[in-house]
Image (cartoon, rainbow, N blue to C red):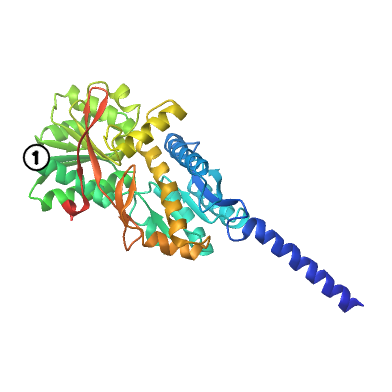
Amino acid sequence: MRKALALVLVCLALAVFFAGCGSKIGPGYDEKEVYIGLFVSTSGEIATFGTDTKNGVELAVEEINKAGGINGKQIKLIAYDTASKADEGKTAATKLATQDGVLVSMGAVASGISLAAAPEFQKYGIPMVSPSSTNPTVTQVGDHIFRICYLDDFQGGACAVFASKDLKAKKAAILQNQDDAYSTGLADFFEAKFKALGGEVVAKESYKKGASDFKTQVTNIKGKSPEVIFVPCYYNDVALIAKEFRAQDVTVPLLGGDGWESDKLIPSAGSALEGSYFGNHYSQEDDNPKVKKFVEAYKAKYGNVPSSLAALGYDVVYVVKEGIEKAGDFDRKKIRDALAGLKAFDGVTGKFDIDENRDARKPISMLKIEGERFAPVRQIKPEEVQ
């Protein structure tokens, strides 16, 4: 009797377990929906970046679902706010993998958060696709980790190519945030490529996180008479730095990376950045019909012009959709393999392949600040930087 009762209890426990797996931890889909995760920071220090990304993701999900979904199933987006903290990224990844049982996950924006989350997705065999984590180490975590943005080594090198070939500069200076890996990484990549092209870095100055006075650094750079100044920092610092350079009558162009992009940059800097340049993931003024359609749809939904993070958020959903469709099945391994073989994806942020390192091989758009415009100058392709 005891054995029979024990057997019944075991069977009931297994039934409950497998039922739970089917709805929460199972294959990431049900009869009507496919579960796709998203983890970005919509609060905290980088909330603007995460909110823009989420807006782009939600626009794409809305479009896809209205058009019939993915292989007949509607996308069920399961999103978590990582509050601009790496440990929250890991927590979100664990929930998406074990509690929500997503088929694929998208995120994060910040490389530090992606690096905290990626091992969890790798452990559970769930493809993770970052829209905008540019640190080269992100995809080195494992073979289930992908990204659709360019990397910092390419971005820094491309800025050096632009300084040398387009601006004809022979002498450059660098001003970096010594406490920010993004800033120091870009600075190092720029310096190495600029020197390889025959240029000279005549000054390399640093400041600490939270600094608001750049007089000493600017004075030191001014004394070396550079023809271009590379400032691989975020927009809030860039505005103050630009004002100090102009206050000291340094009129040469400033040059930066995607950290410059913000609708707060020009209002904060005034005319101090007029005629300066930065590299970005796309141009809102691109005459590509795909870009125009996206910008119009985004403005209609949210009332403002989409940033590059919104564009990357939009593109990452369509990359995931294409991976699932090419896999021909709602199977994580097959989707991973399909993403690894993705070629000539045509997105808002450009046409690109996913290379052998699971990184996007794509161009960078160089933009010029003209009044309140970020005017497109040209794209620099990967082969120009190699």
Residue 154: x %, y % from top left: 24, 51
Circle 1 is placed at which residue position?
Answer: 169
Residue 207: x %, y % from top left: 28, 38
Mark 1 is on which residue type? Ala
Residue 210 seen in render = no
> What quarter of the picture does the C terminus occupy?
bottom left
How many numbered dots are placed on residues in this image?
1
Q: Is residue 131 left or right of residue 193?
A: right
Dot 1, how many residues are within 10 Å of its Cα: few (below 14), some (14-19), or many (20+)? many
- Dividing the picture into quarters, in which one does residue 5 lie? bottom right
Residue 245 seen in render = yes
Q: Is residue 282 left or right of residue 145?
A: left
Residue 133: x %, y % from top left: 38, 48
Residue 170: x %, y % from top left: 7, 42
Q: Nearer the viewer, residue 304 or 120?
A: 304
- Dividing the picture into quarters, in which one does residue 340 lie? bottom left
Q: Nearer the viewer, residue 20 or 266?
A: 20
